[in-house]
Amino acid sequence: MSQTQIYIETSVYEKTKHIAEEKGMSVSDYVNEMLEKSVETPGKGHAVKYFGTIKDDSFRVPEDRPRSWNSPRETL
């Protein structure tokens, strides 16, 4: 396993530490788990390359919606 050092905002560290403690994990193990999930899970970019490969007249490109329609999220 590789070792690295990163710099993050104190508030992000505190939230991460709290979540790790709730799960009974070290911060290192929790961050490693989250990073593994993020690199293993294909995101939107992965799906976009297949967009339009279905030959179906009912398949339509959705309209872009304004960002104001997004739900508010907690900033880390």
Image (cartoon, rainbow, N blue to C red):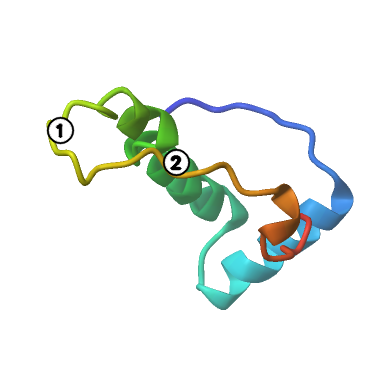
Which label was assigned to residue 38?
Answer: 2
Picture quarter with the C terminus: bottom right
Q: Where is residue 66? Give x, y as percent.
A: 69, 48
Mark 1 or 2, nearer chain start: 2
Foreground of the two, 5 or 75: 75
Q: Residue at x 51, y 72 (%)?
A: 24
**Which part of the image, by quadrant, shows the N terminus?**
top left
User: In the rendered picture of this protein, how many numbered marks are placed on residues?
Assistant: 2
Q: Are marks 1 and 2 in contact (CB under 8 Å)?
A: no
**Circle 1 residues within 10 Å: few <14, some 14–19, many ≥20:** few
- Mark 1 or 2: the one toward you: 1
| Residue farthest to the bottom, as pictured | 22
Q: Which image quadrant for residue 6?
A: top right
Q: Is residue 27 left or right of residue 51?
A: right
What residue do we see at 34% from left, 41% from top?
A: 41
Residue 14 in the figure: left or right of residue 25: right
The image shows residue 62 at horizontal and vertical percentages of 44, 44
Residue assigned mark 1: 54
Residue at the right extreme, as displayed: 10
